[in-house]
Image (cartoon, rainbow, N blue to C red):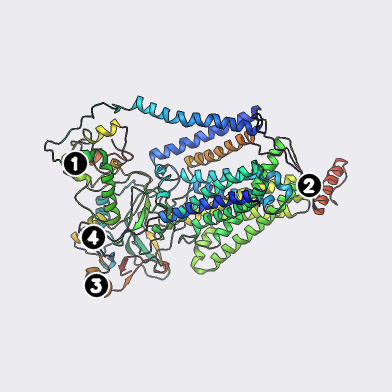
Amino acid sequence: MDIAYQPIEGRSRGYYLLLAILLTLVAGGVYATFTMIAHGLHLSGMTNRVPWGLQIVMAIFYIGLSAGSLVVSGLYGIFGKAEYRPFARIAAFLAMLFLIAGLLSIVTDQGRIDRVFVKPFAHFNATSMFSINPALYMGHVMICIFYLWALFKKKGRLTKPTSVIVVLWALGVHTGTGAIFAFTPRELYNTALLPPSFVAAALSSGAALMILVLVSLFKITRRHLDIALVIWLGRLLAVFIVVAMYVILIENAHRFYLIESREATSYYLFSGYHAVLFWGGLIGLGSVVPALLLFHRRRGSSVRWIVFASVLVVVGVLCERYLIVLPGLEHPPDLFPGWEIVGSVLDEGIVTYTVSVYEILQALGVMSFIGFIFVLGLKYLPLLPVEARAHGQSQMLKGMIARAVARRAARAQGVSATRL
Amino acid sequence: MDRRAFLKTGGLFLVGTPCLGGLLVMSAPRTAAASGAGTRRWGMVIDLRRCPADCTACLDACRRENNVALHDDPRWDVHWIRKVTIARKHGKEERTRTVPLLCNHCDNPPCAQVCPVQATYKRADGIVIVDQHRCIGCRYCLIACPYNARFFNYKGGETWTNTGYPKRSHGVAESCHLCAHRLDEGRPPACVEACRARGTGALCVGDLDDPDSEIARLIADNSVKRLRDDLGTEPKVYYIGL
Amino acid sequence: MSDGTGTIGRLRTFVLVALPIVLILAPLGLSLYDHVFARDALEDGDAAPFLEFPAERDEGCVRDSAYMRFHHWELLREVRDQAMRHGVRGEISLDRCRTCHASRERFCNRCHEAVSLEPDCFGCHYYPASPTALTSDTAPAHGPGR
């Protein structure tokens, strides 16, 4: 069974308008970056107490997204799910673009960008996560390019082992990214569960984004996408959400239980805007609601609800990435246990980070840059299959589809469909 | 997998592994070879009993000597040394204390551990210093320092109070380096000199490994404390009276 | 798909045509820009830019003229690493250069401008452009100095 790939026509007004908008946003990002190069990073919202901000949050968000995309791409190669073969190319392409976005976000955040291309390799520090990770990221991009080449050239025997290598390397990449934070002595960073929780949230956000991308692309290009494939991805996403929630809850329960970290964890969990982000954004809207939706018999089989759940998951994981980086910096280290600092020339207590316009422009610029390449790729590369059908369906899937069809028929006739 | 595929995948790894290995081999040792710096181990003792709450001699001297940037904004101001006032969290003690805080020049510096270009490193004589020519401004060292003793130049400094010493342009990280340029020439750090000139003598910098030095005697004769001993960073700034 | 009309064929053609054009035109374009906008561009046969030497010339103060003209930056780099990384500070320093070569404008900058070089050093290291402007107010705030 050979899959036919057909790039999109890409000649509509909407297509060119989209390209124009993306390029404008890229220009905005370039402007913001160069302004900060010329005048200094004080134009961002970052300070000496909060040295990392939106760009690093977006960087780890993108890197996380690339993991989930790769897992979807590897579904065919590793798990042998033949019905997901049509998505391998676009998922691998997206994964590569996300990683490039992560690298770009980090590079544009440096104080001396002119030095960042040669010095980290000339003076590699094997104990620094910031040295190891870029090496992992670049190796990952190269492996992804090789994987894409193997997919394009239809080297069947090569793609399977390569997809294993790609997913394993991705695991290393994401563990390393979590380690950037976990391997420092900051109270709210310093937990061994951070790399696993990073991987778990990466898988869920990546799977969610793949669902969104696939459904919207197939809908816009009016190509056929079997509901069963989306439903199965939705179930996979539900499992990822549960695993991510489990790790995050244990991580925070442990931090809260230990008296030495209780004060910091109380700040993180219960006070301020990040309490809203954690309980409302990550746990509530980002995990519990989507999990309930996706495990629900009826809603979990409806594409609309799956898409809605995926949007919630993506937003929830973005909240989680923000929570990984910022509260740990806003909360001060305990320099004098038993004492509190009542006077200083600096802000020694809890500080707040406010995003600046320049950082938003930079983030939009990076997003639009990979969006631009992605949209071009859809036109010039055979990424999108002509159709995606679920061959060799399992009994469960057949039953799901039959019920969905019957429900639609019943609704069309005005009959109550709640019993199906 | 057929032979061609095996050769191709294997070739990829044969090329990739030495590349990674080469990167690891390229990484120079983090502490400089002991040459010229001698076998000293610089440390500092701060006697809080002699440090008046309202005195700013060391702060002003350091800023003047090292052209440390001040922007009148606590968000971006750089303070290689600063004084904080602390009060007990519980209990009825009303008295507050003033403590000078600066880079502790740890023997296990987390900042040097995480610098991706080895711009922050510990010299053979124990001073933790930033090579401003190499720093890429990633600010990971600010994140890793558990003492909030490191700063980033968000804005370049405007004034050049000491033309005998460079100032920093924006985009690099920095922290106190015990006036390494003065210690290398046999002069005391600016803060120590100012404190002595004032007659207070609360600061002392010396060779921790020399049993006859003033600093070694101060540590031996007094009850000294270091900040956050439990972290294992082995800071080399000792406080008397904390 | 190898007849050049399919999608992969189109992409391949695009890359095969565009890439060499970009790779060849880019350096040409950049050097053209340099030629047009660089002041007193140094070409073969041109006299070296006029360097104002100090009144009392100490040949071999640090190294001889030929070495300094072509290798002074390597020397500075070595001095820098010795001072920073090993704490070994010797005779050679920018301050000492300044005692004789007091005007950066009429000495250092002449060659640097001729070859379109903007060394990063003077944004941090004190070396005023002209000896009369010795106050700290005239020091450049950030970035490469002129």
> Mark 4: which amino acid?
Val
Residue A211, visible in the rendered structure: yes
Residue at 20%, 38% in the rendered image? C65
Q: Secondary structure at mark 2?
A: loop
Q: Which residue is mark 2?
A: A391
Tag 4–tag 1 contact (CB < 8 Å): no
> Mark 1: which amino acid?
Asp
Between disc 3 and disc 1, the foreground one is 1
Residue at 23%, 29% in the rendered image? C49
Task: State how far apart marks 4 and 1 are (Cα).
Answer: 41 Å
Tag 3–tag 1 contact (CB < 8 Å): no
Q: Which residue is mark 1?
A: C64
Task: State how far apart marks 2 and 4 are (Cα).
Answer: 79 Å
Tag 4 subunit: B
**Does C131 sit left or right of A363 as displayed?**
left
Q: Quadrant of residue C125?
A: top left
Q: Which residue is mark 3?
A: B211
Q: Secondary structure at mark 4?
A: helix
- Image x and y of residue C108, in percent: 24, 36
> Mark 3: which amino acid?
Pro
Q: Which mark is residue B192?
A: 4
